[in-house]
């Protein structure tokens, strides 16, 4: 039996964790392992509160997370992405339904592109010669918060989403 109040409590905690991830990534260019572990470890509670069945619902969540980790581990290996970013996206894949996770990736890419352009321009304007470091956790967190608002907050839902379509 889905527990709506507990589910919203967990979603609130996830939103706070995403804000913490964004702020620590801005400040230190690092997303702590304890934060990513807490997000991943609390996903089964969310599955239970949402009434997900082990098959196929939880299996899909685990499969998408495994694929996400494998793909992003390659980007980490070639130094195109930070380890904290890889772990944060993998942990989010445990929470967010596959269709919404794909939407998260699109929004993340768009926000990350804008963030890169803005920080790149700022870097050039200040005539810095050091390597540009983009706090991509900000883009991941922004996209995650957008998905949470779009999927779970009734005020932000479209009529199709409210009816369970899409």
Image (cartoon, helix red, strand yellow):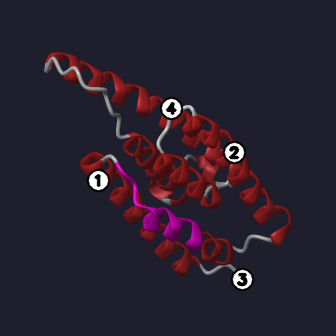
Residue at image position (62%, 54%) is 93
- SS at mark 3 in the image: loop
By secondary structure, the bulk of the magenta-drawn segment is best described as: helix
Is residue 12 rendered to the left or right of residue 106?
left
The quarter of the picture where residue 57 lies is bottom right
Residue at image position (50%, 73%) is 10
Instruction: Determine which of the numbered discs, if any, sits on residue 1 in the image.
Output: 3
Choose mark 3 or mark 4, whichever is in front. 4
Query: Residue 8's spot in the image, x, y percent?
Result: 50, 72
The residue indicated by pointer 2 is 70
Up/down of 9 relative to 33, above or below: below
Query: Residue 131's spot in the image, x, y percent?
Result: 31, 26
Q: CA distance from mark 4 to mark 2?
A: 14 Å
The residue indicated by pointer 1 is 23
Of callouts 2 and 3, which one flags the residue occurring earlier in the amino acid sequence? 3
Instruction: Determine which of the numbered discs, if any, sits on residue 145 in the image.
Output: none
Magenta span of residues: 30-42
Is residue 111 rendered to the left or right of residue 76?
left
Which image quadrant: the N terminus? Answer: bottom right
Badge 3 density bin: few <14, some 14–19, many ≥20, Cα 10 Å = few
Are the residues at dot 1 and dot 3 in contact (C-beta closer than 8 Å)? Answer: no
- SS at mark 4 in the image: loop
The residue indicated by pointer 4 is 80
Extreme-right residue of the structure: 55
């Amino acid at each position: 039996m889905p527990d709506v109040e507990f589910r919203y409590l967990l979603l609130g905690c996830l939103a706070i964790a995403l804000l913490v991830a964004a702020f620590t990534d801005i400040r230190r260019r690092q997303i702590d392992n304890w934060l990513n572990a807490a997000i991943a470890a609390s996903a089964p509670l969310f599955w239970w509160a949402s009434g997900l069945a082990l098959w196929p619902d939880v299996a899909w969540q685990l499969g998408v997370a495994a694929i996400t980790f494998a793909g992003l581990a390659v980007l980490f290996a070639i130094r195109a992405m930070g380890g904290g970013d890889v772990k944060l996206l993998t942990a989010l894949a445990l929470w967010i339904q596959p269709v919404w996770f794909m939407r998260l990736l699109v929004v993340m890419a768009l926000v990350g592109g804008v963030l890169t352009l803005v920080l790149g321009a700022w870097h050039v304007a200040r005539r810095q010669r050091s390597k540009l470091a983009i706090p991509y956790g900000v883009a991941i967190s922004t996209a995650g918060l957008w998905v949470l608002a779009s999927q779970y907050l009734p005020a932000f839902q479209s009529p199709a989403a409210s009816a369970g379509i899409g």
